[in-house]
Image (cartoon, helix red, strand yellow):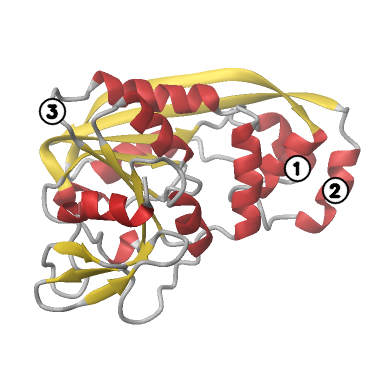
Amino acid sequence: MNPAVQLATVAFLLACPECGDVLAVRGRSLFCARGHGFDIARQGYVSLLTGASTKMSGDTAAMLDARAAFQDARHFAPIAEAVADGVHRDTPPTPFSILEIGAGTGYYLAAALDAAPDANGIALDVSKPAARRGARAHPRAASILADAWRGLPIGDGRIDHVLSVFAPRNAGEIARVLSPAGLITVVTPTPRHLSELIEPLAMIGVDTAKDDRLTETMSAHFVLRDRDVVEYPMTLTHTDIANVAAMGPSAHHAAEQRAERIAALPEVVPVTASVTVSTFGRA
């Protein structure tokens, strides 16, 4: 679907970041009734960032290129399938909306939309390179450039399912935009995730209390409905390892020595993928 057409399809879900009114597509722009306008970029996304420049930088183009290459190799396919299964299991009989916050490449949103053929999706990210990718992630996905920590440009109670996969989340804003029966799926790494690479590549490890902290931060608005661990072995080449190290929080950590460290590893390395998939509903 043409990105402008898809934005028109989901415009009723959006809210003007200036005044909160509903947005509608006219030509190559989104407008609210009060005349605030937001141009659709030629790459297909629309920026709903307003006011002072955001302090959030998001992922760089190089990080997203590495992530897309790793995802295209299907190393994280079981994680995407777990996200899609959760959405499919909780799909209502009528069309519904899916929002991915910190969508990055849009990989997980695309999997969720494939599992929910009547749904429309919104890929939201603060990174322009991510917004460009989000616009072509799926025919039923619209791409929004916005900073979730400054408020989601979404109307109250408009979203039926929110995804947060390896991304920070604003629980208060999610509670505001989620429909009464809506759910949020959060994917976080366990301490075993990529554990075989953390020491050799000086990567950033995972806090052992991460799941407990997640539940605590969500508890003001949500209750935990379901939690599963998805864990499996991967066989990674040096190219795969370079991509997985460059695509996340360790991208800028010990980067100068990374090529040398990777070269010292065996040609093929067994590495564990391990994440927690948590589903929350309203408290």
- What numbered label is drawn on residue 39? none
Q: Which residue is mark 3?
A: 94
Could you tell me which residue is drawn at 64 percent across and 37 percent down? 70
Dot 1 corresponds to which residue? 242
Pointer 2: what residue?
Answer: 259
* Residue 231 location (% of width, % of height): 54, 19
Name the foreground residue: 170 vs 217.
170
Amino acid type shown at disc 1: Ala
Q: Nearer the viewer, residue 274 or 240?
A: 240
Helix, strand or loop at mark 2? helix
Q: Answer with mark 3 or mark 1, whichever residue precedes in sequence.
A: 3
Which residue appears at 31% of the width and 76% of the height? 50
The quadrant in which the N terminus is found is top left
Q: Tell me whether circle 3 and circle 2 mark residues in contact (CB < 8 Å).
A: no
The amino acid type found where label 2 is placed reads Ala
Q: Quadrant of residue 279?
A: top left
Residue 199: percent from the left, percent from the top? 74, 39
Q: Which of 119 and 27 lies nearest the eye of the viewer?
A: 27
Three-letter code for the amino acid on which mark 3 is drawn: Thr
Residue under the point 37% across and 53% down: 3
Q: Are marks 2 and 1 in contact (CB under 8 Å)?
A: yes
Left or right relative to 48: residue 136? right
